[in-house]
Amino acid sequence: MVPDGDLQFGKDGVTIEFGPNANKNRSEFGKKLNDLIDSTNTWTIIPDVKDSKNFKEPVGGPFTKPANANGLATASGLPGLGSGGEIHIPTSKSEYEFGAYDPNDRVQLTDPVIIFGHELFGHAWFLNNGTHDGRPQKWGDRPGHDQAIKVENLLRKFLAGKNELKPSELRGLWANPMKGESMLRMRGTIEWKRP
Ligand SMILES: [Zn+2]
């Protein structure tokens, strides 16, 4: 796709870097992004979350939908063959904004770049490799979502350029009372709601 360059997922979002040093400078997340681009599986990014102006049937929240079950690891932990799929993300056109419970069980607004990264690296990358946690993921009842949240927290540290972040800057995990769950609210309102 970019044979002479490199795609980087960095502080300024996604950038293309050209030149002989491009590959050398590739970050861990830049490598994962290239894994998806180089994959023989087809991945489609659709910016249709809660945007009723531009989409007739906008979806209700960010999510990644595998094309088939090959993206899931088996119950015994063996990898599947891998799959492509669809990544649905909100943009600045979305009428809602999204957040999640932090490790202290307070809802924090999530930067759309983090949401995009969560779907790309926490879900699509594992599905592409056939190593996505195979358990069903239903809001409030999904211990298998920790796989994605742990990657999200690494991305938060990477983008902040720090190894340590305040609890309010991290997302909670299944072990926390509110389980690091996703929340949403209409733009311009204060009250968070569950999706
Ligand atoms: Zn997720």
Image (spheres, grey):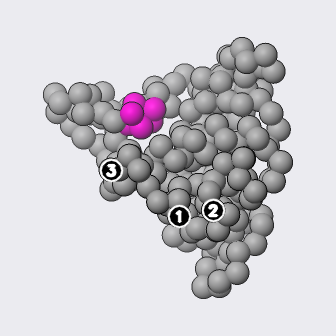
For the question of whether residue 107 can be seen, the reply is: yes
Is residue 125 located in the magenta-colored stretch of the structure?
A: no
Q: Name the residue rendered at 60%, 23% in the picture.
A: 129
Q: Quadrant of residue 120?
A: top right
Callout 1 environment at 10 Å: few (<14), some (14 to 19), or many (20+)? some
Q: Badge 3: few (under 14), some or many (20 or more) residues near its Cα, within 10 Å? A: few
Label 1 is placed on what type of residue?
Ser
Q: Does the numbered disc 1 mark a residue whose Cβ is under 8 Å from ligand 1? A: no
Classify mark 1: helix, strand or loop. Answer: helix
Q: What residue is drawn where x is 64% and y is 68%?
A: 107
Tag 2: residue type? Answer: Asn
The numbered mark at residue 104 is 2
- For the residues labelled 1 and 2, the Cα–Cα distance comes to 8 Å
The answer to whether the residues at label 1 and label 2 have Cβ atoms under 8 Å apart is: yes
Q: Quadrant of the C terminus?
A: bottom right
Question: Where the N terminus falls, by quadrant?
Answer: top left
Look at the numbered disc 2 and give the secondary structure of its residue: loop
Query: Closest to the observer: 140 or 34?
Result: 140
Counting residues from the start of the chain, the first of labels 1 and 3 encountered is 3
- Give how far across and how far down residue 25 sits, in percent: 24, 33
Name the side, left or right, on which 71 lies relative to 12. Answer: right
Indicate the amino acid at tag 3.
Answer: Gly
Circle 3 residue:
161
Would you name the residue on which mark 1 appears? Answer: 168
Question: Considering only order in the chain, which callout, 2 or 1, is on the residue closer to the N terminus?
Answer: 2
Q: Residue at coordinates 80% horizontally, 33% vertically from top-left?
A: 135
Please, what secondary structure does the residue beneath circle 3 have? loop
Residue 31: x and y, percent?
Answer: 40, 31
Q: Magenta stretch?
A: 28-33
Residue 90: horizontal and vertical position, in percent?
59, 61
